[in-house]
Amino acid sequence: MRFGFEPSLPTALVRVTRSTGDCVLQKRVVDDDVVVYELILNGKLLMDSREHASEESLAEIGLRECGGEGLVVLVGGLGFGYTLQAVLRDARVARALVVELEPLLVSFLAREDVRAELGAPDLADRRVVVHEGNVRVAIAEAALGAYDLILLDVDNGPESLSAVGNAELYSDAGLRECRAALRPGGVLAIWSSEPAPECLRRLRACFVDVREWIVPVRRAHRLIDYSVLIARAPVEARR
């Protein structure tokens, strides 16, 4: 017997061991028989499908900063597809490259029944290209000025890392690679579950018009402030 105030026990769907650690995709049934999917990395909740307003806000805020048509967007981290879904809602987006480190998420969202349950985007959309790999490598190998917008949601934040080695993405060198991959005036947007003062400092050293947007989200009975860090590549090239 389970009382109404007790959380349901999760059911593990997939469990794998990667170089980044132990990864578990699981689901549980919550109030009103709602199914919630969770991704656990090294025993820590990385993401779930219960609340995704801030993931959508990452895309919406980033796209508001972009002018013009035919936008080319890099989405770092597929997750459960909510950021990509928000990207595709903008008719100005011509192409979205999604880079996801964890293959099980890509195969999971390729299933039609899962997409229907989550309300996730169709990865076969003609505007979408999905690449399994490390987003830092994809950014480093990108052509100069390849993207109008880069969206990064691959950690719990630039100062709350989820995977081994991700600190390089937010280092001075990593941010310079992001700047080089953006067209002049292009936008970098980073999701964070908590304040990231050191990342903001590094962003201000190589970008212009750096700002932090606070996105309040209600989870259960708590109001939590997430952040979206915005930085614009200078119009004039920096050495």
Image: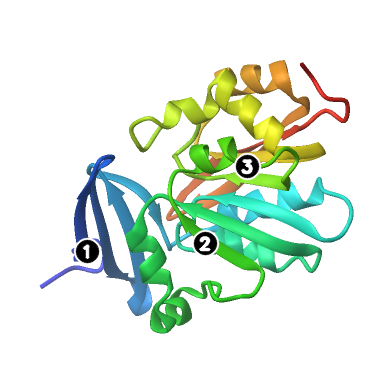
- Judging depth in this view, the residue of 130 and 213 nearest the camera is 130
- Name the residue rendered at 66%, 44% in the picture: 150
Q: Residue at x 72, y 37 (%)?
A: 144
* CA distance separating discs 2 and 1: 21 Å
The dot on residue 14 is: 1
User: Quarter of the image containing the N terminus?
Assistant: bottom left
Which of labels 3 and 2 is toward the front?
3
Could you say where residue 7 lies in the image, as x and y percent from the top left?
A: 24, 61
The type of residue carrying mark 2 is Val
Give the side of residue 72 with respect to residue 234, left or right. left
Asked if the residues shown at circle 3 and circle 2 are in contact, with their CB atoms under 8 angstroms apart, the answer is: no
Which element is circle 3 on? loop
Q: Which is more N-terminal, label 2 or label 3?
A: 2
Residue that numbered label 3 is attached to: 142
Specify the label residue 130 is tagged with: 2
Quadrant location of the C terminus in the rendered image: top right
- Left or right of 37 in this view: 158: right
